[in-house]
Image (cartoon, rainbow, N blue to C red):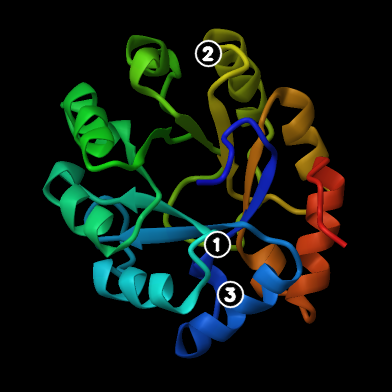
């Protein structure tokens, strides 16, 4: 599995061409990406509906085993879906604190499925829940936009939340930012304490996704192989 204590830019399939998903993802993998962010939306927690375990399994089969599949569940009652996504090939699974009253139990469930456990909060959600479950966290996701759609601008006030979460959790937990991340905002997120950077439209919406990935990675201080 990809080292949690390393910095990573994770291109998000939310902005990829789903008709050519494997080819799109391979382009950024060839450019150096080792983490792919897999957004799952159910039409309830957020209005859009995206993809599920079947697509994850197909992508897992199409990629080298070394590629870390980072599943982000934007769904209600995520505890019902953990086993399916783990079986389909997820390396890490992150769910939203707002989507279930059982965060502690769901983090246990993810770890028992042999995946790394992540918890996400929306911009308006206070970060204190991270401290309550710190002993079970591999990754803390601070949403830097409201979840549901790609192409939004980063909400500046969320950078203060990233700083708070980094101070709260210390150096050993990966802190991920998701939303409005590009070559201009990635350094701001890194300065605040983020180590994993989700980039969707800034990568797959670019004319050259591979070059865009490398530009964001360089801006975020991510080591990119030659």
Question: Which label number is shown at residue 12?
Answer: 1
The 10 Å Cα crowd at callout 2, few under 14, some 14 to 19, many 20 or more, is: some
Q: Secondary structure at mark 1?
A: loop
Looking at the rendered image, the quarter that the C terminus falls into is bottom right
Instruction: Report the residue that reaches farthest toward the left.
Output: 80
Residue 186 seen in the figure: yes
Q: CA distance from mark 2 to mark 3?
A: 32 Å
In the rendered image, which quarter is residue 67 located in? bottom right
Q: How crowded is the residue under tag 3: few (<14 C-alpha within 10 Å), some, or many (20+)?
A: many
Which sits earlier in the primary sequence, circle 1 or circle 2? 1
Q: Which mark is residue 169?
A: 2
Of marks 3 and 1, which one's residue comes earlier in the chain?
1
Name the element at disc 3. Answer: helix
Q: Which residue is mark 3?
A: 25
Q: Which residue shows up at 39% across the image and 53% down it?
A: 71
Q: Tell me the SS state at disc 2.
A: helix
Mark 1 Cα-neighbour bin, 10 Å: few <14, some 14–19, many ≥20: many
Q: Is residue 226 left or right of residue 19?
A: right
- Residue 204 point in image, percent of width and height: 65, 73
Q: Is residue 177 above or below residue 169?
A: below
- Number of the front mark, 3 or 1: 3
Residue at the image point whose x is 26% and y is 38% from the top: 110
Marks 3 and 1 in Cβ contact (< 8 Å)? no
The image quarter containing residue 172 is: top right
Measure the C-alpha gap from mark 1 to mark 2: 25 Å
């Amino acid at each position: 599995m990809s080292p949690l204590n390393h910095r990573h830019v994770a291109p998000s399939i939310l902005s990829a061409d789903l008709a050519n998903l494997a080819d799109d993802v391979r382009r950024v993998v060839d450019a150096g990406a080792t983490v792919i962010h897999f957004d799952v939306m159910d039409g309830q927690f957020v209005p859009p509906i995206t993809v599920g375990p079947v697509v994850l399994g197909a992508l897992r089969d199409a990629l080298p085993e070394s590629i870390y599949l980072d599943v982000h569940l934007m769904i209600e009652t995520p505890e019902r879906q953990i086993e399916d996504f783990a079986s389909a090939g997820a390396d890490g699974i992150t769910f939203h604190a707002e989507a279930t009253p059982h965060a502690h139990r769901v983090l246990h469930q993810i770890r028992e499925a042999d995946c790394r456990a992540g918890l996400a909060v929306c911009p308006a959600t206070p970060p204190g829940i991270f401290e309550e479950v710190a002993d079970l966290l591999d990754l803390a996701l601070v949403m830097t936009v409201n979840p549901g759609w790609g192409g939004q601008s980063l909400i500046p006030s969320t950078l203060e939340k990233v700083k708070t979460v980094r101070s709260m959790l210390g150096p050993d937990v990966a802190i991920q930012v998701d939303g409005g991340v590009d070559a201009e905002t990635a350094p701001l997120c890194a300065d605040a304490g983020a180590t994993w950077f989700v980039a969707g439209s800034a990568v797959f919406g670019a004319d050259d996704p591979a070059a865009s990935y490398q530009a964001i990675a360089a801006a975020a201080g991510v080591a990119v192989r030659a």
